[in-house]
Amino acid sequence: MVEHVSSYYAATAAVTERPALQGSIRTDICVIGAGFTGLSAALHLAELGYKVVVVEAHKVGWGASGRNGGQIVNGYSRDLSVIAKRYGVEAAEHLGAMSLEGGDIIRQRIHKYAIECDYRPGNVFAAFNKKQMHELEALKANWEQHGHLSLELLDLTALKQHVNTDVYVGGLLDKRGGHIHPLKLCQGEATALESLAGVIYEDSPVVSIDYTGAEPLVKTAQGEVRAQYLVVAGNAYLGNAVPELTAKIMPVSTQVITTEVLGEAKCRELMPQHTCLEDANYMLDYYRMTADHRLLYGGGSVYGGAQPADIIAKVRPHLEKTFPSLRGVTFDFAWSGNFALTLTRIPQFGQLSNKVYFAHGYSGHGVTCTHLAGKLIAEAVHGNASRFNHFSNLPYYPFPGGRLFRVPLTVMGSWWYIARDKLGI
Ligand SMILES: Cc1cc2nc3c(=O)[nH]c(=O)nc-3n(C[C@H](O)[C@H](O)[C@H](O)COP(=O)(O)OP(=O)(O)OC[C@H]3O[C@@H](n4cnc5c(N)ncnc54)[C@H](O)[C@@H]3O)c2cc1C
């Protein structure tokens, strides 16, 4: 039996144990993976009246969804202005019209199902230099064209009301962003699904799927599910169960460390408004205070998805640079998790057949978009694929170098962006 990774989240969430799949069952919808994508699709479909079964290899929220930074960041990993340039204004308008929906779904879920997950409003993007500040100004202007009006530029004085450090020159506050305890949200969504007669099997890795017949068939070591529709939501952890999907994305690990309890006064001194923050670098740091007054700090991405030998050693220098008063602080938790990167950094939604849907590749910003993806898959299954198709119609580009060379080639490509951030050009 695989347990959750040893994290602050696993230590502070009430985790329900669920049985493994045994024998043969039949259902309307089978979902592979109980992360935010799978749970969102499952819950939306159960609300529409479908019989839903979720098959999870490990535990609800075991993957990226239960171990991420918890930051509710609106939009996508690529700015809408880039999407407009690459795919046309119409594509950007369609995606722009949906770019706030994922965050709203999370808030609705929290409210409707009374999910206690330490929700706090507001997220900040912080600039290290004038060039990044100009990019944030452009981001705000562009977002406003798509109807996002809850943004506020922060000069240095205003930024210091959110983060007490000298490393930035300014920032952008998104009042419709925020942060949550992600594993509590996963557990709450799973419980909501079960309240609608949805069934979740844990410790049930899917070993193969067959979608050549009239109904897709999903096989685990000890059981099988036949369903009218299948949703594949394994993202970076899918492994070899569906090789045609695994080949489309690259796992990237990012690391999170959590300090000892600092106390309310210290947290308020460092981040007075309890918002969360990510910086504007290509290889970015992200952090926030937890409900029990610790600093939860993430960064240190590794292409290919490897876990660094010493996570604290990798992330600590960044944290201490941001908050010099925390030099020498003790860390109670350190963990790694994989997200799925696409070459374009735009999430990929699609179908393997008219009965099999998938969504993955949120490229580091998936807390909101996973929730949107689940809703769009549910709409498509229910007969209206128009919004799903705005994503699935976007062209797909494979990583150059194939599975063997895509990691070194992507690392080399990233050097240019990292150097630009360092030089502020
Ligand atoms: C450390 C970290 C920090 C991050 N911080 C943020 C953040 O602050 N804000 C943000 O917006 N995004 C963040 N992200 C990205 C975000 O967490 C992900 O994009 C999102 O959670 C992806 O959700 P998912 O459901 O698609 O995948 P996952 O949450 O990874 O879930 C996939 C699930 O599928 C299961 N699975 C896989 N294969 C099989 C199989 N064969 N059989 C059965 N089950 C299977 C896995 O066990 C897993 O539970 C972060 C990611 C990481 C790793």
Image (cartoon, rainbow, N blue to C red):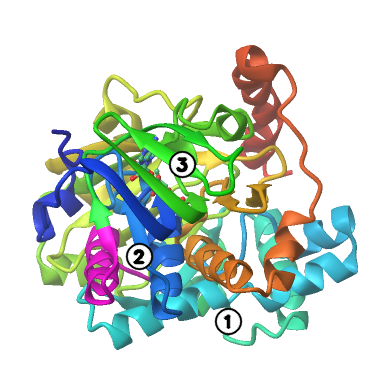
State how far apart marks 1 and 3 are (Cα): 49 Å
Rendered view: 396 above or below 378: above
Where residue 170 appears, as percent x and y from the top left, is 56, 66
Q: Which residues are magenta?
A: 179-199
Amino acid found under the numbered disc labelled 3: Leu
Distance from the alpha carbon under mark 3 to that under mark 2? 54 Å
Q: Residues within 10 Å of mark 1 (few under 14, many from 20)?
A: some
Please tell me whether mark 1 sits on a helix, a strand or a loop. strand
Residue 152's disc is 1
Left or right, 94 with reference to 293:
right
Where 400 sits versus 321, above or below? above
Numbered circle sitting on residue 217:
3
Marks 3 and 2, the one that precedes in the sequence:
2
The mark found on residue 243 in the picture is none
Please tell me whether residue 408 belongs to the stretch shown in magenta.
no
Is disc 2 placed on a helix, strand or loop? Answer: loop
* Residue at x-position 22% and y-position 76%: 195
Can you see residue 300? Answer: no
The alpha-carbon separation of the residues under discs 1 and 2 comes to 18 Å
In the rendered structure, which amino acid carries the disc numbered 1?
Answer: Glu
The residue singled out by tag 2 in the image is 164
Secondary structure under the numbered disc 3 in the rendered image: strand
- Image quadrant holding the N terminus, namely top left
Q: Which secondary structure dominates the residues rendered in magenta? A: helix
Q: Earlier in the sequence, mark 1 or mark 2?
A: 1
Q: Is residue 90 left or right of residue 257?
A: right
